Image (cartoon, rainbow, N blue to C red):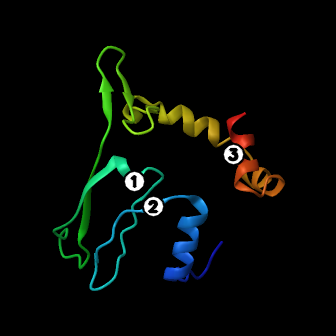
Amino acid sequence: MIAHRTPLSPRTSRHLLDFTGMYQIVDFATRANNILDVLLTEDEQIITAVAADATIGHSDHLMATFKIVLVVNAASQITTNPVTKGPAYNWRLADFDAMHEYLSCVDWQSVVYHHPSALDAWSVFIM
């Protein structure tokens, strides 16, 4: 358990993005002069119309709104990412209860202990 969290410095954040190959899309201040909203993607071309929006209630944070560009093939009902041409998943049809039941049986501490790198853990997860 982490008792204290320290914010990432801009340098550490940049290194993290470079290391993972991800893009931080929000590039405007969302609270005072700070960018507090994080929108990460591996494909920056499918995220469009990123903009600051009004606050919710009495919050002092602006909302970040955006659009995700996907193409639906009407013949097959498979949603496709227009950039990578790969599938985009229809999560509203997912059986989250079954996923929760299955994943709650995994000994995650053991998985992480025996497969400390992300690539090892991923290869175990997908098998």
Q: Residue at x 31, y 32 (%)?
A: 71
* Amino acid type, mark 3: Trp
First in sequence: mark 1 vs mark 3: 1
In this rendering, position of residue 90 left or right of residue 97: left
Residue 77 occupies quadrant:
top left
Residue at 45% over, 37% down: 84
Marks 1 & 2, CB-CB < 8 Å contact? yes
User: What is the three-letter code of the residue carrying label 1?
Assistant: Glu
Report crowding for label 1: few under 14, some 14 to 19, many 20 or more residues within 10 A (C-alpha). Answer: some
Q: Which residue is mark 2?
A: 23
The x and y percentages for residue 47 are 33, 51
Q: Nearer the viewer, mark 1 or mark 3?
A: 1
Q: Secondary structure at mark 1?
A: helix
**Residue at image x 37%, y 63%?**
25
Residue 7 is at least partly visible in this image:
no
Question: Hey, which quadrant is residue 30 in on the image?
Answer: bottom left
Three-letter amino acid code at the position of disc 2? Tyr
Earlier along the polypeptide chain: callout 1 or callout 2? 2
**Residue hosting label 1:** 44
Q: CA distance from mark 1 to mark 2?
A: 6 Å
The label shown at residue 32 is: none
Q: Is residue 113 above or below residue 63?
A: above
Badge 2: residue crowd in 10 Å (few <14, some 14–19, many ≥20) = some
Question: Is residue 53 visible in this depiction of the protein?
Answer: yes
Which of label 3 and label 2 is nearer to you?
A: 2
Q: Secondary structure at mark 2?
A: strand
Q: Which residue is mark 3?
A: 122
Q: Position of residue 75 (x, y in %)?
A: 32, 14
Task: Measuring from the top left, give residue 112's x and y in whole percent.
Answer: 75, 55
The span from disc 1 to disc 3 (Cα, nearest Å) is: 23 Å
Circle 3 residues within 10 Å: few <14, some 14–19, many ≥20: few
Position of residue 16 relative to residue 50, above or below, is below
